[in-house]
Amino acid sequence: MRKKSLMLAAVLAAGVMMAACGRTSTLPDNSQDKPVASQQTESKYSFELKGIELKTDGDLTEYTSKLGEPSGGYYEAKSCAFEGMDKFYYYDSVTLQGYQKDGNDKLYSITLMDDAVKTKEGVRIGDKKDKVVSAYGSDYTEADGQLLYESGNTRLSFVMKDDEVQSIIYSVK
């Protein structure tokens, strides 16, 4: 039953991402604050899966070859935001989304799907806002029910409802 629920959640997540292609984001536009790519510092946010450190904008092909076959499968669709295809890898409790950049597959986002996994700092779905702030500090932006932390080229989003973490997403800013 858990596997069916996980697959349903993964399919819904992919559908939402694809449906959002024509939608304008309501997140704050920090584009004027972004440093030029060559000046961008390394992000302090990464996620560890099966002993492998995953970083947004990292080499997706390298990560997936080390992680092996995704337990929940693989899905791809023509990207509406980038060149080429968006690629989704469904591992237990974690979805990796890839995109193409300069002809290479890069890791665009890491979505934690349930409370079976946690961030390196120990936060998981179901934790309270106080635990997030204790682990990550008070230097965040709050928008659209999310606590947004940024470092280097990574945005770490904690989607909140009633002061409780509903979803955790690492993504390229």
Image (cartoon, helix red, strand yellow):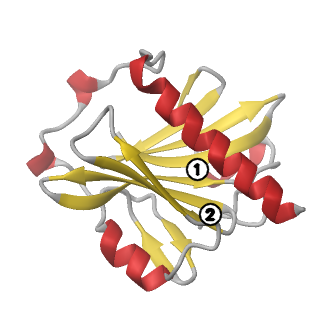
Image mark for residue 42: none
Q: Quadrant of the C terminus?
A: top left
The type of residue carrying mark 2 is: Glu
Residue with the most extreme right position? 1
Which residue is pictured at 55% across the width and 47% down the height?
169
How far across and how far down the image is residue 133, in percent? Answer: 66, 44
Q: Is residue 27 above or below residue 127?
A: above
Residue 13 appears in the rendering: yes
Circles 2 and 1, Cβ within 8 Å, touching? The answer is yes
Which residue is pictured at 29% across the width and 59% down the height?
106
How far across and how far down the image is residue 138, in percent? Answer: 58, 38
Q: Residues within 10 Å of mark 1 (few under 14, many from 20)?
A: few
Which residue is pictured at 80% across the width and 64% down the height?
3
Q: Is residue 108 above or below residue 19?
A: below
Which residue is pictured at 90% across the width and 62% down the height?
1
Q: CA distance from mark 2 to mark 1?
A: 8 Å
- Which residue lies under the disc numbered 2? 121
The type of residue carrying mark 1 is: Tyr
Q: Is residue 71 above or below residue 149?
A: below
Position of 135 compared to 68: left or right?
right
- Which residue lies under the disc numbered 1? 136
How far across and how far down the image is residue 97, in percent? Answer: 45, 53
Position of 171 compared to 73: left or right?
left
Position of 49 compared to 85: left or right?
right
Q: Residues within 10 Å of mark 2 (few under 14, many from 20)?
A: some
How far across and how far down the image is residue 16, in percent? Answer: 57, 32
